[in-house]
Every structure is written in C-alpha cells, then in structure tokens.
Image (cartoon, rainbow, N blue to C red):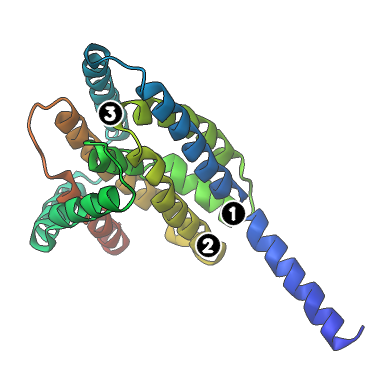
Amino acid sequence: MPKNVYLSSQIQEVNKYNFNYMIGTILNTIAVIAGATIGIILKKNMPDRIKTIYFQAIGLFTLAIGISMVWELNHILIVVISLALGSLTGEWLNLESGADRLSNYLKLKFKIGSEKFTEGLITSFLLFCIGSMTILGAIQEGTGVSSDLLFTKSLMDFFSAIILSSAFGVGVAVSALPLFIFQGSLTLIAMGASRFFTPEIVHGLTNIGGILLIGLGINILEIKKLRVMNMLPALVFVVIFLLIFA
C-alpha cells in the first residue's frame, strides 16, 4: 500500500474512533438544548402565580436531588475540609462576582431578559455535570465499554431541561456549552487515564456536588442567599485529597 494511502486510512480510523467515543456527550448536549428550548416556549405562557409555585417546586426538587447525592457520605473529613478550603478559595477569587459580570455581559450581548440567568446556568451545570452518572458514563464511553449510560442520562437531562428552563429561562440552554466541555473532557481523559477515576473520587465528587445543589435549592426557595458559586473549588480539593489519602 502506498504511504499516503496508508496515512489517509489511519487518519480516518482515528477520526472515527474519536467521534464514536464522544457520541454520548454530543447526544447529551443536543438533548439539553432541545429540552431547554421546549421549556422556554412553555415559560412564556405561565402567569406569575403559577411561576411562583413552580419555582418553589423546582427548589424542592433541587434539594431532593442534592440530598440523594449525599445520602451515603463517605470520607466525611475530606469532604468537610474540601468544602471549607474550596469556599475560602472561591471567596478569595470572588467567583460569584465574576459569574455575575459574565452573566450581565451575556445578557447585554445577546439581549437576554431573564433575571434568573446565572441561577439557571449554575443549577443546570451542577445537575447535569456533577454526579456519578456523568463521571461513570464518561469513563465507560472513553474506555470503549459502552455509551448506554450517557444515552440514559441524555433522556433524563432532556426532561430535566424542560422543567428547569421553564423556570429559569435561557440560562439552562447555555449550560449545554459547559456540559459539552466538561463531559467531553472527562471522556477524552478516560481514553488514556480511566484508572484516575477511582470509586472514591467519583463518590467524593458526587457528595460535594450534592451539597452544592442543596445550597442552590435554599437559594431558589429564597430561604437564605448562599454564595454557592464561590464553593465550586471544593470539587478540585476533594479530588486532590482523595488522590493523596484514599
């Protein structure tokens, strides 16, 4: 076989390999955009009285999801320290203000009128991206086992996006971008480093994500305003500590 023909066939095989190993994330991204679009259309016809009770239902739903993610809390000390150090780091970096500035810029740039844009974006990102289903699904897809778990997640995220976007608006649709980047990156990493995602790390990330979702549920219910965005670095700290001590 001529050298150029051989190289061409090799490139085609690599492209096919990479595409097949990303199909679950691509479908998941499309599902979130489609569900969010439906929810935005439904939101326009909601009277204020219905919107109020709907936000309360969404707040309770977010709390329930968060509680389910921390129901089995392992490595409690690591989780607490990670949350404390992550919150201090986020407060020092002032991530909440940065997110608000980015939110205001996007709203002005694209003429978005949603008051709940930032809240919808953060809630959706945590719900869609931080959990055992996301991490395990990305590992399975990246290592070539199967994309079935991400296909199931795509269906769940589709209906969740309808519910969330009918309450929060376009911020849920925008969350499809960080979803694609985060989940796609996990899939690519898993292609060569699946052993990195130990059960302890998956569980730790799920626990921290659940705690942050509980905080978001409290915000949505307007019980107290928590700076959940500033707590996000806890996700990095929990991985570092689990790698060292677990």
* Residue 74 visible: no
- Mark 3 or mark 1, which is nearer the start of the sequence? 1
Q: Residue at x 90, y 86 (%)?
A: 2
- Mark earlier in primary sequence (2, 3): 3
Instruction: Inspect the image, locate mark 1, and give the three-letter code of the amino acid beneath it.
Output: Met
Circles 2, 3 touching at the beta carbon (< 8 Å): no
Precedes in sequence: disc 1 or disc 2: 1
Q: Quadrant of the C terminus?
A: bottom left
Amino acid type indicated by mark 2: Leu
Between marks 2 and 3, how big is the CA–CA gap?
29 Å
Circle 2 Cα neighbour tier, 10 Å, few/some/many (<14 / 14–19 / ≥20): some
Q: Mark 2 highlights which residue?
A: 188
Q: Is residue 184 left or right of residue 222?
A: right
How far apart in space, not on screen, are marks 1 and 3 (Cα)? 28 Å
Q: Residues within 10 Å of mark 1 (few under 14, many from 20)?
A: many
Quick one: SS at disc 1? loop
Residue nearer the viewer, 112 or 64? 112
Q: Can residue 50 be seen?
A: yes
Identify which residue, 199 or 177, lies in the foreground: 177
Q: Residue 112: x and y, percent?
A: 30, 42
Quarter of the image holding residue 210?
top left
Instruction: Measuring from the top left, give residue 175's x and y in whole percent.
Output: 38, 45
What whole-number distance in Å separates the C-alpha atoms at marks 1 and 2? 8 Å
Query: Pointer 3: what residue?
Result: 62
Q: Any mark on residue 74, and which?
A: none
Residue topped by disc 1:
22
